[in-house]
Image: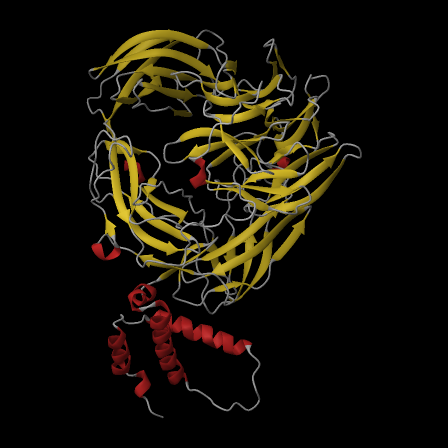
Amino acid sequence: MNDWTSTPQFEESIRQSFGVPKIRCEFVDQVYVDLMHLADAKPRKSRPLLRIQPAWIIALVILLVMIIGVLWIGPQRVYAEFIKLFGYIPGVGIVEQSSPIRVLAEPVSITRQGISITVTSAILTGDKTHIEYRIFGVPGSAYPVSEDVLGCTLQPYLRLPDGTQLTQVDDFPSVPVSVNEAVFVMPCIFNTLPGKVPENWELPLRFVLAPPELTVMPVIELSPSPESSLFPNAAPLSENDSHISGSKADNSLTVRKEVETSDGYILIGQFQPQYMPEEWMQTNAMEIRDANGKIVSYTYPQDISPAMTDAGSGGMGWAVQFSAAGLVYPLTITIQGAQLIKDTSDAKAEFTFDAGANPQPGQEWILDREIQLAGHTLKLISISADSRNGYAFYFKGDPSVFSVGVQIVGHTPNGGGGGGSGSPNGMFSASLSFDQIPTGELKVIISELTLISDSLTWQTRWSPAVPRNDLPANPTPQPGVCLTGDAIAGLKPISPLPPNGKALLYEMLDEANHWGLVLYNLDGSQKQVVTSAGNWGALSPDGNQAAFSSIDNGIHVVDLASQEERRLSGVDGFDLHWSQDGKQIAYIGIGGSIIDSVFIVNADGSTPARQISNWSYETVIGWSPDNRQLYFAAPFTSGAAWKVYSFDFANNQTQELFTIENGTPKFLNASLSPDGNWIIYRGRDNSSLYQVRTDGSDMHLIMDNIGAGRVVWSHSGWLGVTLWNSATEETSVIIIKPDKCEAYLLPGLQGELDGLFIP
């Protein structure tokens, strides 16, 4: 046999003729394994006409890949294609491609005492084993009712045939290529109490080679150099483009990887600002603009965990995903923020105040007391007691003061927090919580002064490693999509304004960072504070009453005309939904032995609350038009999916309807349309909205990349949506009729929309 095909001279001649770099051995091995996998999958003839030796196969693979690569994608792109050491699998993240990728042969499920655990999929790569599993049917009574009680914390693991245990830490460690079977072991369901539900679950798994159609997107490693079109020393944006009072041009902000997706890119990078001891950074969300100044809407890919930086200084890894159609390069990536500088003089100030013998949540002491600290004059405006057995302190200082630390002498807190300043009004707060609230005359020490610098800007620029021509300049929206992030800026106010319309918003009430529920006309006029001690508001269908969850526990109902307020006795919860006749309220109950299960109660408090489900972490969707059915959803534990149910009041039966597979694992924000035909919910990216019929059919995207928050329906069929701008951290409110794709901005409203009434 001639052996010339395996000589390095032959490979070198091919490379030089096309001007491409040396092919990695891992790539050749992967192609070889894939070809052998395909060959094994085809029927074999009894008498093959030609038998090719392995050395020839490798040589032909090398030659074929080079020729096809150059002819198909062009010489300029060959280099980028062959340096991809990693791949991106949607839903899994970035993986090594140094060994054959394997998958779960088939889903495996086991049910015990009404609780099911299902391993739905697995991806095995050279660096990790990604397993998707779901748990359903755990009753709320299996979980602790108090935050200071912790249930099971043992992690699942894979048990290999030789007894080796691979414990889950985010993902499981990689399984050796030679091992094609393992047992998924769950010692106990996370956070459940001992003896409440079955333990020691075991599910046998079998692994096979991944099918050819498995999507693996190449990941291109970048370096801050002209060759990769990265410009870390970019000039700051102009005053017309952003609010800047200072600039910082350095290499703190970098793009490290790019992934080419079907409609755009994923960029992965780091932000590691330069800082001195006793300094750290406060930053806003990232902003991206193209070369024409167009703001690029983006989402955060849920399956990528960027490399961590020194987060204690304000650094972070980051990853963003966006559609690239119509963009002009380079893109400018901007982070704005400021330096926070801790005072090192150990300056302190102290004062006393009398909290009384029995301070109550919501009680407030107005002080307006000036305090000198390290050369700065602060004003302690007020102190208030809260529901966490603690106190909140509200300050005002000059704009250079960010925060202070607070201690109550003789009392050890179990928690605390506060909001920093840096705003022109100089307002900030600090809070402490305790096992038991301190009473009587209290001595308070203020120290740990932290100052904030002028605004700073960090920037970098990025262009694709290889230009692509497969994206349309003006993409056609998906069928059924009414609104995208790019179109939000062009929304106009509704005209004429619907008469007598009302909106209930949860917002900051004053400069002291007090929050509450406020009722407005749709143009922002006639502000009426409904409560300064509640949240999770909901407007009755006729717009005459508001229900809310009070911070001193309990659900309250307010008559908006008379402002008469009543507490529903023995009722406590959140996620409130009025029945369509305004006579009942569905909610998620909390307190006692209740863990996030669905309840209903008469709005006038005439009857005790009634529990209609006993699963955990549920969410209310809404009432049918005739009030005979209530829709709700229960999540799969450890999986981004929800089961949708209806409860029929005529026969007291619960019916499982369908499963939402693409909803956010966070708060679903599901809401039923007044005609009972559609359910609106938040997508998995926490930025989009989907709608689906109540029988599970016609599930489709209706709003894409809009930063969706809470959604509420008006009885007349208008849908109100809270939008969150990740770059500015500001909110806005829009109304839309999904059936007509008719959308308008409500420019006079900011905050989180909790209720909407449009006649």
In this picture, residue 192 sits left or right of residue 4: right
Q: Is residue 747 positioned above or below 378 on the image?
A: below
Quadrant containing the C terminus is top right
| Viewer can see residue 189 | no
The residue positioned 58% from the left and 55% from the top of the image is 120
| Viewer can see residue 678 | yes
**Which residue sits furthest front?**
496
Q: Is residue 759 positioned above or below 684 on the image?
A: above
Give the number of callouts.
0
Q: Position of residue 69 (x, y in %)?
A: 36, 71
Q: Position of residue 572 (x, y in %)?
A: 61, 23
In this picture, residue 475 sits left or right of residue 206: left
**Which residue sits furthest bottom?**
1
Q: Where is residue 334 in the image (x, y as percent from the top left)?
A: 29, 40
Q: Is residue 399 positioned above or below 329 on the image?
A: above
> Considering depth in this image, is 85 or 449 the residue closer to the camera?
85
> Considering depth in this image, is 412 or 495 the residue closer to the camera?
495
> Considering depth in this image, is 661 or 261 the residue closer to the camera?
261
Quadrant containing the N terminus is bottom left
> Considering depth in this image, is 452 or 597 the residue closer to the camera?
452
Q: Where is residue 28 in the image (x, y as percent from the top left)?
A: 37, 73
Q: Is residue 25 positioned above or below 9 on the image?
A: above
Colour scheme in use: secondary structure
